[in-house]
Image (cartoon, coloured by chain):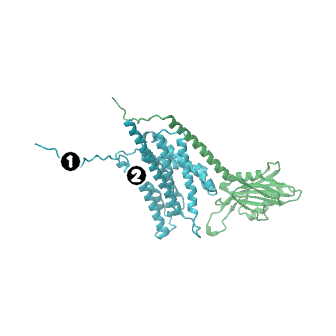
Chain colours: A cyan, B green
Amino acid sequence: MSFEPILLAPEEEPVEVYPYRRVWQTTWIEVLLLFFVVAGVYAAAEVFGLLPRNLRDGNGKLALALLPLAAWLLISYRGERRAPEPRPHLLSVLLLGALVANAIAVPLSERLFTPDRWLPQQGFFGRVLGYTFTVSFTAEFLKYAVLRYTVWMTHIHQRLDAAAYALAVSLGFAVMLNVRFALDSDATVVATGLWVASNTFSHLATGLLVGFFLGELRLTRQPVFWMPAGLLTAAFAGGLYYGFRGIAIVSGLGIGETASSPVRGLALAFGLIAAVLLSLAFLIQSADERQQAIASRRELL
Amino acid sequence: MNRSVFYTEERPALTFHQRWNGYLSIALAAIVLALGVTMRDSVLNATITVEDLEAGVRAQIPQGWLLDRGSSDYVFRAIDPDALPFKTLLQVSVLPVGPDATPANVLHQIEIDRPQRFPAYRVISRRNITLRDGSPAIRLTYAYVESERNPALEALPIVVEGVDVVVLRRTQAVIVSYREERANFENNLYRFENLLNTLEIF
């Protein structure tokens, strides 16, 4: 004679495994890593005197330029490979981002738009609009074109997919500009680090906006001017960042302070990427929850 | 059933809204970039009017250039402060001349004076032209070498190309000049042509 065992504890419910890489977590780690490395290099040179201020070591500059890519490969890409359902073609999208930056954006900027010749003389609004309509819009349109004509139709199945691909193409774009700056300019290691962080953060932030609009266009019904509005929004965000960066670096509130302060530029860039990451995480989560609620209500009916 | 090794993933068809979003994005790119280039051109080619009532000269020079009127050698001189390594120069000067003088006489005087002031001075061309208002003038193109005066900067000498246009008005000769580094001479020549076209002698 046998008895069924009496269970004193409730049965364990199977935990649902999240099958994708968590985009926001990995991106935050990469952003914080870059921020702290650059801030550390700045502090080592300017505060503690551990590095010479005018150090112009080519290898150091190149290492800083490639740091965002290395962090992405080690954290995001490795995480993606380990996920049960990895997003395909992320690396290809990143390489395409780098290629369009080098083949289209840089020649357009250097030969046609030449922003250094006319934008710095403009007032705040002139700088914002001038940058928005030239360099910024070109960058956002190229990121859009890479995503729209490669992975958009076949590989964006949820909103976070769009964010992951947008981050990849933006990172490729930014890293190419970083490398060119490190190799071509006569800047010091500290200045290169600050430029790399600022450039990378701003491209990630504006690229994420393009990705958000692309994701919504793929998954929901949007008006015909949705994507143009998205491109203008992202380009304008880039223009605003350019305008405020000039103010942040040059202006100061202290008495007798006349020298520029690049740290404020770094703080502004970090603030931009942090604001965009938090806002989009909130927007995407609420949109997903709303969609889920509507779907479950339909099932009940 | 045989299945091809290579197969493509099913691509869902685009909706009307998605398709038009694509078209409008491309159209917007064309419009915005045209707007950007127009903005850039309007800033780079913006001019201001410079007038000297005593010399009787009025002309337009690029906005943002440094204007110098503080010399007896010229009526005014405009210099591009951002140009490197040579500061692009536009200049209008006036020389008193006799009633029988011709532009060629004035040019001859200039050509005697120049080699003493400019190292390696060479005349490239000399030709008669007619200005927009129908006045006869002479256009002289020349080149010389400009060296950095501060030896500590260890800069290479620069080849400078210049143009002078000489035109007579009553008892004075007006000389309109343009000087630029050889490599950028053609690119900025339009600024000189603009100065010449807007020049009024009264």
Q: Chain of mark 1?
A: A
Q: Quadrant of the C terminus of chain A?
A: top left
Residue A208 point in image, percent of width and height:
48, 49
Question: Up-down: is A211 above or below B5?
Answer: below
Residue A80 point in image, percent of width and height:
38, 49
Q: Residue furthest right?
A: B99
Callout 1 environment at 10 Å: few (<14), some (14 to 19), or many (20+)?
few
Q: Residue furthest left?
A: A1
Q: Chain of mark 2?
A: A
Q: For the residue marked with disc 2, what is the amino acid? A: Ser
Residue B70 point in image, percent of width and height:
76, 65
Question: Up-down: is B4 above or below A92?
Answer: above
Residue at the spot 58% in from the left edge and 56% down from the top edge: A243
Q: Is residue B148 left or right of residue A238?
A: right
Secondary element at tag 1: loop
Residue B154 point in image, percent of width and height:
61, 67
Question: Up-down: is A218 above or below A82?
Answer: above
Choose top left, top right, bottom left or bottom right for residue B111. bottom right
Q: Which mark is residue A7?
A: 1
**Residue A179 in sight from this viewpoint:** no
Question: Which residue, given by chain and number where applicable, does mark 2 sit on?
Answer: A76
Q: Which mark is residue B95?
A: none
Q: CA distance from mark 2 to mark 1?
A: 43 Å
Q: For the residue marked with disc 1, what is the amino acid? A: Leu
Q: Is residue B116 left or right of residue A294?
A: right
